[in-house]
Structures are given as C-alpha cells and as structure tokens.
Amino acid sequence: KLNTKVMEGDDSGSDVKIKVEAAKGGKEETLDADVVLVAIGRRPYTAGLGLENIGLETDNRGRIVIDQEYRTKIPHIRVIGDVTFGPMLAHKAEEEAVAAVEFITKNYGHVNYGAIPSVMYTHPEVAWVGQNEAELKEAGVKYKVGSFPFSANSRAKTNLDSDGMVKFLADAETDRILGIHIVGPNAGEMIAEGVLALEYGASSEDVARTSHAHPTLAEAFKEAAMATHGKAIHY
C-alpha cells in the first residue's frame, strides 16, 4: 500500500495483525497476515572467517578493508561482495568478481558504483539507480525532474495494476541523467534501461527520442524522460 505507514504489529495470536494508517494521517486500518518479513539493516558476515588468524583487518562496521583493486593488506588475497564496502547485492558482487579477475590478469578493471541498481521486491515494486533528490540537494547540484504515473499508461491500466510512477532526475544544464526512480509494476525489470543510460552518460532527451513499443509499461519510462522537458504526451 502506497502512502501508508505501519503503526504497530501484534503476533500474539495465530496470525499477525498490522495496524496502518495513511502517511498524512487518517483512519487506522488493520491488516491480517500469516507472517511479517522485516528486512531492515544488514551487516557483513565476516565473523567466523578466521580473519584474525591471517592478520586481515575490518573497519568499524565489520567490513574487510581493501584498496581500489580489491586487494587486502595481504596482496594475494582479494575480497568482493557482502564482506566489504558498498551495497550488499548479488549483482554488485558479480561485477566486482569480473573486475577483480581483470585486475589480476590485465591490471585493469571497472565497476561503476553509480550505476548499480537497487530493487525492493514488494507490491508495487520499487527500483532505483543513481542519485536521489536529497543527495543532489546536499551536493548543490542543479537538477530538473520529469515524472510520469502508471495511471496514465495503457498497459498498466489494462493489467489493473497502475499504482506508482517513473521519475527522472537530470542535470539542469547538460541534461545528463543523474538518477532514475520507479515505483510500480515490473519496476525491477524496467530499471535496467536506466542502468544502461547512466553507464553510458545518456541524457533524458536520448531516452525521450528512443522508440518504446506500445502498449508496454516501458512507455512510462520514455514519457518520464519527455516530462523532464515538459513534453510528456499522455499526461
């Protein structure tokens, strides 16, 4: 449920009761569920690896300290993934694995950490890549916003699943895409186009000029890019 906050939970009975209310205040509602999954907070799983036996250090969050080529203080030991810095995501670790091997064999590797997508597998799904508005404001970056709701997308309406939106953040002067955020159906699949755009330094106009098949959810992606220039067609 969008625009909703959890007030309390009760698991004293045979099921779980969750009390929620609208984020802006309003009538409280009780939801019944079999189980509730709380997936907040992660930490590196380094305990028990025997790091102290070989003299490897961890930082104050338990992450193994490495350099830019994934080397530890013991040069022939390289570390990637959840036990070191960055988001704890399988696809991030996969990119690091390739880069680590490239550093070993070619003395060069590449991972663009600014283009690693994140997905929340909820309903509706949430996906994002790049920076958000709070980060851009803190950095003093001038940016423009383009958004498009799935409620104006024909495929989403046909599927009776039209909650959410696509939002583009682009540099106010160069139009280079800085971040893309999606809440809605298939957000986790759609964000791949955003990753490609960030990886190759695309502008919102580049995406806006790219043909997207009709009727598809991906049209909302194109329309959000067009909205960055105030030219969305269907909203």
Image (cartoon, rainbow, N blue to C red):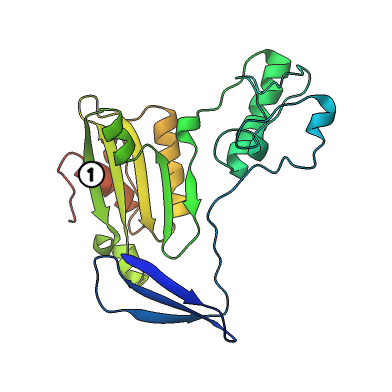
**Could you tell me which quadrant the N terminus lies in?**
bottom left
Give coordinates of residue 57: x percent, y percent.
Answer: 71, 27
Please, is residue 207 above or below residue 30 in the view?
Answer: above
Which residue is painted at 42% across and 27% down in the image?
Answer: 200
Q: How many numbered marks have been drawn onto this rendered protein structure?
A: 1
Please, is residue 166 above or below residue 66 in the view?
Answer: below
Which residue is painted at 37% across and 70% down in the image?
Answer: 159
Q: Nearer the viewer, residue 85 or 159?
A: 85
Give coordinates of residue 21: x percent, y percent.
Answer: 32, 73
Q: Is residue 164 visible?
A: yes
Q: In the figure, is residue 111 to the left or right of 191?
A: right
Q: Which three-letter amino acid code belongs to the residue tagged 1?
A: Gly
Q: Quadrant of residue 38?
A: bottom right
Please, is residue 43 above or below residue 62 in the view?
Answer: below
Q: Is residue 203 visible?
A: no
The residue tagged 1 is 146
Please, is residue 224 above or below residue 150 in the view?
Answer: above
Q: In the figure, is residue 42 to the left or right of 193?
A: right
Which residue is painted at 19% across and 56% down in the image?
Answer: 234
Q: Secondary structure at mark 1?
A: strand
* Extreme residue in the right direction: 53
Give coordinates of residue 54: x percent, y percent.
Answer: 83, 26
Give coordinates of residue 32: x percent, y percent.
Answer: 48, 82
**Could you tell me which quadrant the C terminus lies in?**
bottom left
